[in-house]
Image (cartoon, rainbow, N blue to C red):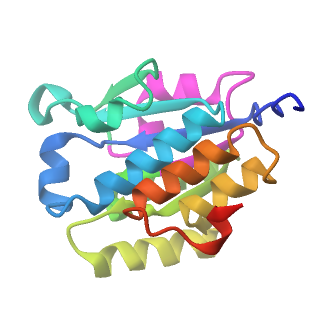
Amino acid sequence: MAAAPSPPSDLLLLAVDLQADLLAAVDPAGALTRDCRFALAAATGLGLPVAFTEQVPAKLGATAPALRAPAPAAPVWPKDTFSALGDPALRGALLAPGGPRHLLLAGIETPICVYQTAIDALRAELEVTVLIDCVGARRPADAAAALAALARLGCHLLPAETVFYALAQDARHPFFRGLTTLVKERAGNHGSLALNL
């Protein structure tokens, strides 16, 4: 079997404020949690770096344990700014020489922290892809307006499966079966024909 292709060294999945207390308000049915868990597990399986932010964790608590589990060694950056890049320490880490050139964004809330992080990343000349099924908000209309504005500014808006299958490239990738297993788990084992390869 061929060696696994190296993951792109300039990508980072940034999971924004996926704290249990915030998720309780945004994701009462657990769908966003399930979709973010998929993205975190897929990124880890493909060898992509992952990082978490936490909004005022002393008051709002830590990232939900189910979402830390797929990437337990990933850094967790506390912040009190809405944009991850508004915090000097985070900005320094994200924009350091050799750091990511492309952010994949997941998290909450779409019209606040995700939106402001994406705007600041674009201003810093980073490429940004918002994983549209891995972001959420209390008000769907607000989220839709924010995503539309980000698209006009040059953000890529794509579903997580589209992004992770594009990174795997073909069915010979060593993580292909792992990825399809994650897809089936996410869908409740109602996989598509493409997953039966």
Residue 120 visible somewhere in the drawing: no
Relative image position of residue 144 (x, y in whole percent): 40, 78
Relative image position of residue 91 (x, y in whole percent): 52, 30
To which quarter of the image does residue 62 belong? top left
- Name, please, the residue furthest toward the right: 2
To which quarter of the image does residue 129 belong? bottom right
Instruction: Work out which quarter of the rendered image holds the C terminus and state it.
Output: bottom right
- Name, please, the residue furthest toward the front: 196
**133 horizontally vs 109: left or right:** right
Give the vertical position of 65 relative to 180 (above or below).
above
Instruction: Work out which quarter of the rendered image holds the N terminus and state it.
Output: top right
Q: Residue at x 29, y 77 (%)?
A: 140
| Front-lying residue, 98 or 192 | 192
- Name, please, the residue furthest toward the top: 73
Give the vertical position of 184 relative to 21 (above or below).
below
Whether residue 102 is in magenta: the answer is yes
Q: Residue at x 48, y 58 (%)?
A: 184
Which span of residues is magenta-colored?
82-105
Q: Residue at x 66, y 22 (%)?
A: 96
| Front-lying residue, 29 or 182 | 182
| Front-lying residue, 39 or 58 | 39
Relative image position of residue 145 (x, y in whole percent): 40, 79
Whether residue 85 is in magenta: the answer is yes
**111 horizontally vs 196: left or right:** left
Residue 77 visible somewhere in the drawing: yes
Relative image position of residue 60 (x, y in whole percent): 13, 36
**131 horizontally vs 177: left or right:** left
Number of on-image labels? 0
